[in-house]
């Protein structure tokens, strides 16, 4: 049961790890390798090894970089003159008086420039000490980073401290511990598309022909006399929907998030006999997040409530105890390995929040919650526990470095399911054959060219861990008049079972020309079974939300993954290394319960189609004779119809510019408008080195997917009294015009753009293909002898570098960034991507 608010806050295990502390990263691809990790491997396995101490004299390093962030791209909006022209044309077409007029100063405000931070500096400093003896190793690092956001007032500061200690007590016993401490201060206000205070939403809609400031207004900002909206200056009306002066909001609203993180791990490892290792380790991951928000009582989201304040305290603790034993034995040409283990995990989440509105004095608004300072208090809290247990085993066998076999089995239990459904079993098996180790191959002509030739195959099953307790029904507060009570608010499903992911993989590894050329190829099939989603149910059943969680069916991903690397040049002074990969992926929903489609606002899950495909009407452009939007009905004849803007009614195509007979655009006319999931993606990296100079260029590419540009749908082509994108300049104006932008008509947004509700048309669906030059690093490593000579042996290594990140993107997508989308492929008033240039150094003492 929860009161007021609820939810478990998940912590990201990687978010507080300093990149300078990472030793290596390994990705496990095949089913057998990932099956041993059970439900934790549902989305794949990435093994990150962090630095620890090692034998040798103490080595002190200092790593730092300084740079600047900026918006990768801005939206192309109307300027003041264009705004006046476009808006007045819409009013005139609708037979209404014009409303837009420039002021005497001919103001032309770029509201994106108003909210963007032109001096968004970024810096990071890391100091580390590493060393040890034959039996003892230690590593200590400290990091400070400061990043200014591309939107004003959005700053993030992070402090981190990490230490590890390992000690070999004797030949039987080894112990060790590690501790990570991190604190993050985040002043990131609401920047997206939500409510009046969403920075991007407000900036895109703000009128370009009005000022930011108004000296005659009591606030000093350009705000209407009733404080409800952005000031209108010489316009005859205020902005649509009371959108705010976002500069005032950024300057006067307050938001601060403080996050504290502790990750601690301690282990003991014994080796009773040769080849046998037994290890037990316990870890704690504790995160405490304190959020404070204050919405100004004068203007913005807090105005109607005379100020709104909220304070939220969330604590998440994850306790993990891991125990495992490994035994490795070599008998002649036989290599044997055994692993047995058990993990026990407990998650505890706590949340306490309070807030209020109706403040007696603005002073209380920005200085915390003070008793009796506000008229309408609110409070809530949450407490939750979740348990997880695992038992697993693995056998590895190799013969003569030619034949390989791996068998694994893991049983996971999660408290998120009913008792009889809690445990799932996940097997895995893989085989491999290194043909190049055979004598007949070595003696063949191929043996002189091919250094490594291995074929492999694997099968594995992993589970998907669920959050919360979806098998339980819940109750919540239910006020009735002046009385408070509780009521049924969520239907549980005790029949829910594990989601499983069955992985099939066959692959080949090749190396040529003394291993200068390396190539891998994999064909994979991943089948997700028992997917848990909210399934709509008839309202007559009386189930809250008219939905219930069910294991709805099966989904499949299959494809090919290719990877390779090439030492193009290997000279003493110059080298050129090329590495790349590409994946081709096909997604399909195999089966659903009762073959029932699952339709959300703009997406559909349907058998035989990619999951979450876009679902809406087929747009057919603009009738060049009258400017009406045209659509294609989803019937056998694929009938083309037009929407008559003047009376918001649909008709068939008549002769010339006339209307035909009355028609309709109904739900039955909706169809699949495209796949939001990329069908191909990959990367390519070129690394050059010449006498201490280094150049690394990394490219990423992706495509085959579609994006719903909701920003264009609701903002850039809106017909209300707010700004629009420059694309609307290409509107239909007179008979014969060929364009995809219909005739302007004030008050007809929903009809012309199919905006509002759950309507969507292919007009707003775009290709998501892109190529990015993701990273460019130019560096110089000073020769060791020169460094020592210059510093009298006080410095052992020195490297300088210049870096560009996310600076170049090639795409036909009209939005800000084809990667700036939700998991459903929707781009809605998202903050532009950040591009960064920086200078850095790596110093070793």
Image: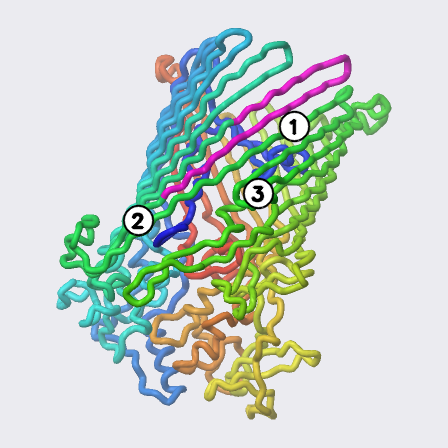
Q: Position of residue 813 (x, y in %)?
A: 52, 60
Q: Earlier in the sequence, mark 2 or mark 1?
A: 2
Q: Callout 1: 10 Å neighbours few (<14), some, many (20+)? A: some
Residue 123 located left or right of residue 359: right
Q: Callout 3: 10 Å neighbours few (<14), some, many (20+)? A: few
Q: Quadrant of residue 82?
A: bottom left
Question: The magenta stretch spans which residues?
Answer: 322-350
Please state, as top left, top right, bottom left or bottom right, where the C terminus lies in the image. Answer: top left
- Nearer to us: label 3 or label 2: 3
- Nearer to us: label 1 or label 3: 3
Q: Position of residue 700 (x, y in %)?
A: 55, 46
Q: Which residue is mark 3?
A: 419
Q: Name the residue rendered at 16%, 63% in the picture.
A: 220
Q: Secondary structure at mark 1?
A: strand
Tell me if residue 89 comes above or below residue 690 in the rendering.
below
Q: Nearer the viewer, residue 311 or 101?
A: 311
Return the mark for residue 268.
Answer: none
Return the mark for residue 393.
Answer: 1
Q: Secondary structure at mark 2?
A: strand
Q: Which residue is mark 2?
A: 353
The CA distance from mark 3 to mark 2 is: 32 Å
Q: Earlier in the sequence, mark 3 or mark 2?
A: 2
Q: Earlier in the sequence, mark 1 or mark 3?
A: 1
Q: Name the residue rendered at 39%, 61% in the picture.
A: 193
């Amino acid at each position: 049961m929860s009161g007021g608010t609820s939810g478990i806050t998940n912590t990201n295990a990687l978010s507080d790890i300093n990149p300078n502390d990472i030793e290596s990263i390994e990705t496990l691809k095949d089913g057998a390798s990932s099956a041993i990790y059970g439900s934790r491997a549902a989305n794949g396995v990435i093994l990150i090894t962090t630095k620890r101490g090692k034998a040798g004299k103490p080595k002190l390093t200092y790593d730092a970089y300084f740079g600047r962030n900026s918006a990768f791209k801005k939206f192309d909006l109307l300027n003041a003159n264009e705004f006046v022209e476009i808006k007045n044309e819409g009013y005139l077409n609708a037979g209404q008086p014009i409303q837009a007029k420039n002021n005497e100063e001919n103001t032309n405000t770029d509201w994106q420039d108003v909210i963007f931070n032109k001096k968004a500096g970024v810096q990071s400093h890391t100091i580390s000490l590493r060393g040890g003896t034959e039996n003892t190793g230690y590593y200590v690092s400290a990091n400070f980073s400061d990043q200014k956001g591309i939107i004003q007032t959005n700053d993030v500061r992070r402090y981190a401290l990490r230490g590890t200690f390992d000690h070999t007590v004797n030949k039987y016993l080894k112990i060790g511990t590690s501790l990570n401490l991190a604190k993050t201060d985040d002043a990131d206000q609401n920047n997206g598309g939500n409510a009046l205070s969403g920075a991007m939403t407000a900036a895109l809609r703000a009128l370009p022909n009005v000022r930011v400031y108004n000296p005659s207004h009591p606030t000093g900002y350009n705000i209407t006399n009733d404080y409800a909206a952005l000031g209108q200056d010489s316009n005859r009306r205020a902005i649509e929907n009371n959108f705010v002066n976002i500069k005032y909001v950024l300057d006067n609203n307050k938001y601060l998030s403080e996050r504290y993180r502790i990750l601690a791990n301690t282990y003991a490892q014994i080796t009773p006999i040769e080849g046998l290792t037994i290890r037990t380790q316990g870890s704690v991951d504790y995160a405490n997040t304190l959020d404070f928000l204050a919405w100004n009582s004068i203007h913005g989201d807090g105005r109607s409530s005379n100020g709104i304040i909220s304070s939220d305290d969330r604590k998440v603790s994850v306790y993990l105890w891991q125990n495992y034993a490994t035994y490795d034995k070599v008998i002649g040409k036989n290599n044997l390995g055994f692993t047995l283990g058990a993990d026990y995990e407990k998650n505890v989440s706590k949340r306490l929040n309070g807030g209020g509105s109706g403040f007696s004095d603005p002073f209380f608004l920005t200085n915390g919650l003070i008793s009796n300072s506000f008229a309408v208090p609110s409070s809530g809290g949450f407490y939750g526990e979740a348990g997880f247990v695992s038992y697993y085993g693995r056998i590895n066998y190799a013969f003569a470095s030619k034949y390989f076999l791996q068998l694994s089995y893991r049983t996971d239990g999660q408290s998120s399911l009913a008792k009889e459904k809690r445990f799932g079993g996940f097997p895995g098996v893989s085989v491999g054959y290194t043909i190049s180790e055979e004598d007949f191959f070595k003696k063949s002509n191929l043996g002189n060219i091919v250094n490594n030739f291995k074929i492999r195959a694997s099968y594995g099953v992993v589970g998907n861990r669920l959050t919360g307790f979806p098998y339980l029904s819940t109750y919540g507060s239910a006020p009735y008049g002046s009385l408070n009570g509780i009521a049924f608010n969520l239907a549980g499903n005790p029949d829910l079972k594990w989601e499983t992911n069955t992985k099939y993989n066959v692959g080949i590894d090749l190396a040529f020309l003394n291993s200068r050329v390396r190539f891998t190829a994999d064909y994979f099939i991943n089948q997700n079974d028992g997917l848990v989603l909210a399934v709509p149910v008839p309202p007559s059943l009386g189930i809250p939300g008219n939905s219930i969680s069910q294991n709805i069916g099966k989904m499949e991903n299959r494809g090919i993954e290719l990877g390779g690397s090439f030492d193009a040049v290997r000279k003493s002074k110059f080298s050129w290394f090329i590495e790349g990969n590409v994946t081709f992926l096909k997604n399909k929903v195999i089966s659903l319960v009762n073959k029932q489609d699952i339709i959300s606002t703009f997406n559909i899950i349907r058998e035989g189609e990619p999951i979450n495909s876009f679902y809406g009407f087929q747009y057919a452009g603009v009738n060049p004779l009258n400017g009406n939007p045209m659509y294609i009905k989803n019937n056998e004849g694929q009938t083309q119809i037009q929407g008559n803007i003047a009376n918001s009614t649909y008709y068939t195509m008549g002769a010339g510019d006339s209307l035909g007979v009355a028609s309709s655009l109904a739900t039955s006319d909706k169809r699949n408008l495209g796949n939001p999931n990329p069908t191909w993606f990959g990367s390519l990296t070129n690394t050059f080195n010449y006498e201490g100079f280094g150049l690394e260029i990394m490219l990423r590419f992706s495509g085959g997917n579609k994006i719903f540009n909701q920003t264009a749908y609701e903002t850039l082509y809106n017909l209300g009294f707010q700004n629009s994108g420059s694309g609307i300049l290409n509107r239909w104006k007179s008979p014969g015009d060929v364009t995809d932008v219909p005739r302007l008509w004030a008050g007809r947004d929903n009809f012309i753009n199919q905006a509002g509700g759950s309507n969507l048309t292919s007009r707003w669906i775009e290709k998501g293909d892109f190529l990015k030059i993701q990273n460019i690093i130019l560096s110089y490593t000073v020769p060791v002898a020169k460094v020592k000579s210059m510093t009298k042996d006080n410095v052992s290594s020195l490297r300088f570098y210049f870096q560009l990140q996310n600076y170049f993107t090639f795409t036909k997508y009209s939005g800000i960034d084809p990667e700036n989308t939700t998991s459903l492929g929707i781009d809605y008033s998202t903050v532009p991507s950040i591009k960064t240039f920086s200078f850095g150094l790596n110093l070793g003492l």
